[in-house]
Amino acid sequence: MYSQGLMGVEETPGGEQDLLDRFQARIDAGEKIEPNDEMPEAYRKTLIRQMSQHAHSEIVGVYPEANWVTRAPSLRRKLQAMAKIQDEFGHGLYIYSAAETLGVSREEMIGQLLSGKAKYSSVFNYPTLNWADLAVIGWLGDGAAIMNQIPLCRCSYGPYARSMVLVCKEESFHQRQGFEAMVALMDGSPEQKAMGQDAVNRWWWPIMMMFGPHDADSPNTEMGVKWKIKNFTNDELRQKFIKATVPQAKLIGIEIPDPDLRFNEETGDWDHGEIDWDEFWSVVKGEGPCNHDRITARRKAHAEGAWVLKAAEAYAAKQAARDAA
Ligand code: 3HC
C-alpha cells in the first residue's frame, strides 16, 4: 500500500489522508513538485528508484558502444560514436544530480550499482557483435529511450522533468545518427544489408523489453501514472514505439523479426508476438549474456578514477582553508 511510508505523517496537520489528498490535488492540477515541497515518502522512494535506475542505465549503456569506437568504419562515424558516449555519461551525471535533490547521495546510488544491487536497463546486457549493432542501438535503442523520455519532460517532479529536456534533445540526435548509419548500410552491398538485418534480428526483442513488463505485471505503473511520474504505461509506450518504427523499417527495407506483428484494424494498434519474459527477468536478475562484463567494467573504471575524486577533494580542502584564512 503506497501510503504506508509517508514522510512526516505524524507532524502533518490532518494526518496521512490529508497529506495524500493535498498532494494528489497538486498533481491533478498539473503542478510541479519541487525538492522542498511536502511529498508522500512513497513518492520520494519511487522517484529515487526510477531515477537512480535511469542514471545507471545511461552510464552502463555506453559499454556496448564503447566497444566499437576504435573500429568505427570512418572518422565521421568515430566522432559520432564518441559524441554520443560523452552525451550518455553527461545524462547519467545530470540524472544523479536530480535524484540527489530527493535526499539520496550519489555515493549511495553508485555504491548500489557497483555492488550489483541496483537495476539498470536490461538492453545493455547484450553484446555488440559488429558495426551494424551500433546503428541499430542508435536507431531503435535510443528511439525506444526517447519514446519513454519525452513524456518524462512533463513528469510531476520538477528536477527530473527539467533534466529530461536536454537529455531528449541529445537522444534525438542519437536516434537520427543511428537511423542515418542504418540507411547507409541498407543502401550498401548485399553483405552490408545482411549485417543490418542481422543486427535488427538480434536487437528487436531486447529493445521491446526495454519498456518493461506488460501493464498487468508492472507493480509500479498504477501509482507511477497516478502521481504523473509516468504519463504513459509500459504497454502504451511499447505500442507507440512500434507505430513509429514500422514505417521507418519499411522505408529502408528492414523486416521486423516478428511473424505475429500485424496491424489490428479494430483497435488501431499493432498486435505483436509474445515477449520472452523468462529471458527478460533472467537478464534483470543479472544472468544476461553481458551483465557480469558490464559491472566488472564499471567497477574497474570506478577504481581507476578514484584518484580524480581524491584530487578534487584535496583541491576543495585547500580552497576552503584559503578562504578561511
Ligand atoms: N530493465 C531492467 N529492469 C526493468 C526494466 C528493464 N527494461 N523494465 C522494468 N524493470 C524493472 C523495474 O525497474 C521494476 O523494478 P523494481 O520495482 O525492483 O525497482 C520492475 O522491473 C517492475 O517494472 P515496472 O514496470 O513496475 O517498473 P517501472 O514502473 O519503474 O517502469 C520503466 C519501468 C518503464 C523502465 C520506468 O522505470 C522508466 O520509465 N524509467 C525511466 C527511463 C529509463 O530508466 N530508461 C532506461 C533506458 S535509458 C537509456 O536507454 C539510455 C539511452 O542512452 C539509450
Image: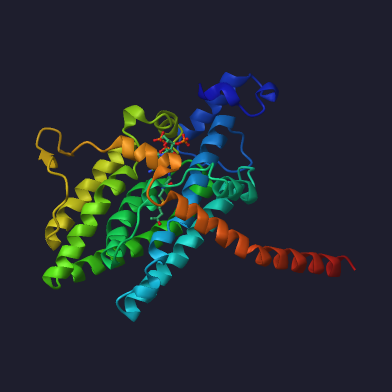
**Residue in the foreground of this view, choosing between 162 and 304:** 304
Percent position (x, y) of residue 153?
A: 42, 49
**Residue in the foreground of this view, choosing between 155 and 138:** 138
Q: Is residue 80 above or below residue 168?
A: below
Q: Farthest residue in the left direction?
A: 265
Q: Is residue 177 above or below residue 124?
A: below
* Res. 231 visible in picture: no
Residue depicted at 48% across the width and 34% down the height: 27
Q: Which quadrant contains ligand 1?
A: top left
Asked where in the image residue 271 lies, by quadrant, the reply is top left
The quadrant of the picture occupied by the C terminus is: bottom right
Percent position (x, y) of residue 170?
A: 40, 62
Q: Is residue 324 above or below residue 11?
A: below
The type of colouring in the image is: rainbow
Residue depicted at 29% across the width and 61% down the height: 133
Percent position (x, y) of residue 202?
A: 25, 53
* Res. 106 visible in picture: yes
Residue depicted at 32% across the width and 39% down the height: 279
Residue depicted at 42% across the width and 56% down the height: 61
Asked where in the image residue 229 lies, by quadrant, the reply is top left
**Residue in the foreground of this view, choosing between 220 and 188:** 188
Percent position (x, y) of residue 28?
A: 44, 32
**Residue in the foreground of this view, choosing between 132 and 230:** 132
Asked where in the image residue 175 lies, by quadrant, the reply is bottom left
Please state if 28 lies on the left or on the right of 94 as rendered: left
**How many circles with numbers are drawn on the protein?**
0
Q: Farthest residue in the bottom direction?
A: 75
Please state if 158 lies on the left or on the right of 308 as rendered: left
Please state if 85 lies on the left or on the right of 97 as rendered: left
